Image (tube, rainbow, N blue to C red):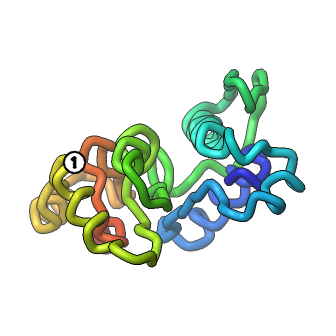
Amino acid sequence: MTERDPIITAKEVASVDVLSGGRMNFGVGPGWINQEIRNHGTDPDHRWKVMRERVEAMQQIWTHDIASYHGDFVGFDRITSWPKPFRKPHPPILVAGNGPNVAKRVIAYGDEWIPMLRPHVLDHITEFKKTVPAPTSPSASLSSAANSTTSTPTRRPASTASCSGSAPRTPRP
């Protein structure tokens, strides 16, 4: 996300989500090649905060008809952007990365974790599972969704973030 404009990316992600009928999963990462990050105007030392602000800005765009966002690295006033995502409030956000703060990032602004294939990644997964609250059971999620009056897929609350690699699916009629 440190190499992408959040306003354009929000529109692109929402468009794919609409065209796919709510099947878009949005993976985000801070980038890791410092020269590349710098060439996109981001100081590599600030890449995590830039990513967070860009994701938060996109969440504002997706959930408000007229959106504003003000951070240290991202700022805009009263913009409109259409289409809005098919899934409400927006497609699942999968946060990439490893390290001691990844669980905090997933809980803060993501829905799931994309562990990076590195040595000892299984240790990171074990630690992540200890840190993050367990998601609601998929069968409970599917049965409650099947009994709802709407056929629109729903997004899990951030407090149920997981590292499953895929979002629970709502059965289609």
User: Is residue 60 left or right of 108 when viewed as pictured?
Assistant: right
Whether 123 is drawn above or below 158: the answer is below
> Does 54 sit above or below residue 91?
above
Which residue appears farthest toward the front when viewing the image?
A: 119
Quadrant of residue 39 in the image? bottom right
Residue ID at (35%, 72%) = 121
- In this figure, which residue is indicated by the disc labeled 1? 131
Position of 172 with respect to 83 (left or right) is: left
In the rendered image, residue 161, in percent from the top left (x then y), is placed at: 30, 52
Q: How many marks?
A: 1
Quadrant for the C terminus in the image: bottom left
Q: Secondary structure at mark 1?
A: helix
In this orientation, which residue lies closer to the viewer: 86 or 51? Answer: 51
Amino acid type of the residue that numbered disc 1 sits on in the rendered structure: Thr
Depth check: 72 or 60 in front?
72
Q: Position of residue 166 (x, y in %)?
A: 36, 71
In the image shown, does 30 or 137 lie closer to the viewer?
Answer: 30
What residue do we see at 69% from left, 22% from top? Answer: 70
Decide if residue 81 is on the left or right side of residue 153.
Answer: right
* Few, some or many residues within 10 Å of mark 1 (<14, 14–19, 20+): few
Residue at image coords 50%, 50%: 90
Q: Quadrant of the N terminus?
A: bottom right
> Which residue is painted at 26% across and 68% down in the image?
123
Residue 97, compared with residue 70, is above or below; it is below
The percent position of residue 86, horizontal first and vertical second, equals 52, 57
